[in-house]
Image: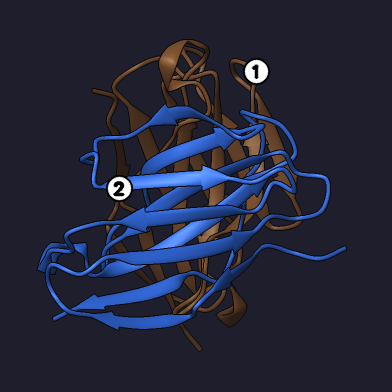
Chain colours: A brown, B blue
Amino acid sequence: GQQVMQIPQYQHVQEGEDFTTYCNSSTTLSNIQWYKQRPGGHPVFLIQLVKSGEVKKQKRLTFQFGEAKKNSSLHITATQTTDVGTYFCAGLLAGGTSYGKLTFGQGTILTVHP
Amino acid sequence: ETGVTQSPTHLIKTRGQQVTLRCSSQSGHNTVSWYQQALGQGPQFIFQYYREEENGRGNFPPRFSGLQFPNYSSELNVNALELDDSALYLCASSPQRGTEAFFGQGTRLTVV
């Protein structure tokens, strides 16, 4: 079945440093979504990428979708303590019986030291 | 606009028992999905309901079942609970299938 792998599993940074997490799918995706989950909280939607090679920015966050629509990345510039949490990518297959099934990666836990 | 709400927030059950978890979807959303999140893992897709019909299912046994009601609220039922069913159960609603998911705060289920 479809697998979504995410690296690294953990990332510790000093406040002000940059952070990147990478996501790879075993199958071509219809779209990829990114979520953030604070400790003790629930996943919160950040963004959805649909087009091959798409790049989207949200303030200090930059999201990319690969040309083959099988990989993606999230880059945070100049991290802040408010960025702490687990970042998940989630891939969506197009059509068929799997339509609507989001497959989540295992997440990258980001710790930011002040 | 009301967000996704789940009840109860915490639950302790004994192995072999049955449990029902409830979810009220966000206003205007016709799609509800359920996920199981074990500690330190990403959410695992259980199933999705669209307009009261099951629309897709993950790798979960038949003892995991669900319902969606005309008002788009939903229930997750788990029969014959096992210790490994202990997890955070998340409900998420979407305005349409394949679009962003808005998660509730989850139900923490502990099976002893």
**Residue designated by label 1:** A51
Q: Closer to the camera, B34 or B61?
A: B61
Q: Secondary structure at mark 2?
A: strand
Q: Residues within 10 Å of mark 2 (few under 14, many from 20)?
A: some
Residue at (74, 64) in percent of width and height: B3
Residue shown at the point (25%, 78%) measured from the top left: B110
Quarter residue B7 falls in: bottom right
Find disc 2 in the rendering and name its residue: B64
Task: Look at the image and tell me whether residue A80 can be seen.
Answer: yes
Q: Chain of mark 1?
A: A
Task: Identify the residue shown where x is 40% and y is 63%.
Answer: B89
Give the number of callouts.
2
The N terminus of chain B appears in which quarter of the rendering? bottom right
The amino acid sitting under disc 2 is Phe
Camera-side residue: B45 or A111?
Answer: B45
Task: Give me the residue at 59% from left, 15% from top.
Answer: A52
Vertical placement of residue A13 versus A50, above or below? below
Q: Residues within 10 Å of mark 1 (few under 14, many from 20)?
A: some
